[in-house]
């Protein structure tokens, strides 16, 4: 199967517009016709029942590849805060709701309950590519930082305003997309996937589905 440009299709299977922006920038120029879930409005999001980022990335990639009939790549990611026993982790998207100021307030409250104002933390991303019922590639990335004393910055999305990255001396919401991608969990995972797409997977495209 090839797309309009004669390239094999690849579905970027995320409903998160912040993730999508970052992924499309990193995969720019790969020899695939990149599709998004906007092309498949009838496909509902699956329930993310996995206990790990890897479980959920595989579950989402297999689910979307099957429903769309195309190779699909999924990202499962989140923030793990040391002092909160690695919460919110795989529950990052819906932990204390979906409003980020409310989520940030919950983090500061839970830190304060432990007599803390900050904690080491990390973002983790696990990326899985599924094709015809199989996982054909997986990559991961981790970035270590700490919880900022208060939210700062307007770039990025999600927890970026409270993720202070010491080598930059600011939060990830205070840098542009390229500087974030150069060091981020998603930047690492999708840069590795990009290399796979350009070498083995690109040379022998994974799509031949009916
Ligand atoms: P999809 O499953 O459709 O991809 P989602 O947002 O539900 O979208 P996840 O289940 O993987 O995806 O949850 C990831 C959450 O982790 C995300 O919604 C943010 O709250 C947080 N997160 C992940 N990467 C982040 C980043 O780079 N910056 C800030 N927050 C991030």
Image: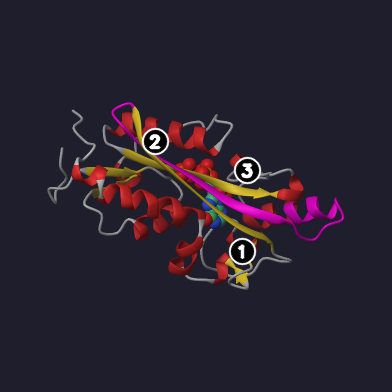
Quarter containing the N terminus: top left
User: For numbered disc 1, what is the local secondary structure?
Assistant: helix
Magenta residues, as a range?
Answer: 107-133
Q: Is mark 1 within 8 Å of ligand 1?
A: no
In-front residue for pair 209/15: 209
Mark 3 sits on what residue?
Answer: 89
Mark 1 sits on what residue?
Answer: 161
Q: Are marks 1 and 2 in contact (CB under 8 Å)?
A: no
Residue appearing at x 73%, y 53% in the figure: 107
Residue appearing at x 36%, y 48% in the figure: 193
- Within 10 Å of disc 1 (Cα), the crowding (few <14, some 14-19, many 20+) is many
- As displayed, is residue 162 above or below residue 61? below
Residue appearing at x 31%, y 43% in the figure: 11
* Chain-order first, disc 3 or disc 2: 2
Q: Which tag is nearer the camera, tag 3 or tag 1? A: 3
- As displayed, is residue 120 above or below residue 88? below
Mark 2 sits on what residue?
Answer: 61
Q: Position of residue 48 (x, y in %)?
A: 52, 33
Q: Position of residue 83 (x, y in %)?
A: 76, 49
Quarter containing the C terminus: top left
User: For numbered disc 2, what is the local secondary structure?
Assistant: helix
* Chain-order first, disc 1 or disc 2: 2
112 drawn magenta:
yes
C-alpha gap between disc 3 and disc 2: 19 Å
Q: Position of residue 81 (x, y in %)?
A: 69, 50
Q: Is residue 22 left or right of residue 55?
A: left
Q: Is mark 3 within 8 Å of ligand 1?
A: no
User: For numbered disc 3, what is the local secondary structure?
Assistant: helix
Q: Are marks 3 and 2 in contact (CB under 8 Å)?
A: no
């Amino acid at each position: 199967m090839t797309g309009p440009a004669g390239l094999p299709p690849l579905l970027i299977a995320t409903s998160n517009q912040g993730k999508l922006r970052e992924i499309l920038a990193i995969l720019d120029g790969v020899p695939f016709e990149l599709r998004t879930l906007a092309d498949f409005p009838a496909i509902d999001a699956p329930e993310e029942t996995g206990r790990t980022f890897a479980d959920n990335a595989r579950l989402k990639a297999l689910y979307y590849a099957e429903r769309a009939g195309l190779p699909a790549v999924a990202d499962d990611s989140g923030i793990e805060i040391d002092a909160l026993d690695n919460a919110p982790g795989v529950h990052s998207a819906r932990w204390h709701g979906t409003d980020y100021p409310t989520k940030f307030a919950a983090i500061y409250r839970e830190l304060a309950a432990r007599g803390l104002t900050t904690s080491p933390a990390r973002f983790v991303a696990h990326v899985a590519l599924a094709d015809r019922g199989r996982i054909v590639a997986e990559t991961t990335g981790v970035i270590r930082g700490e919880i900022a004393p208060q939210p700062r910055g307007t770039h990025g999305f999600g927890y970026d305003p409270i993720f202070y990255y010491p080598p930059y001396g600011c939060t990830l919401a205070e840098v542009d997309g390229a500087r974030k991608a150069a060091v981020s969990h998603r930047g690492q995972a999708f840069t590795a996937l990009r290399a796979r797409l350009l070498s083995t997977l690109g040379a022998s495209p994974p799509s031949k589905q009916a």
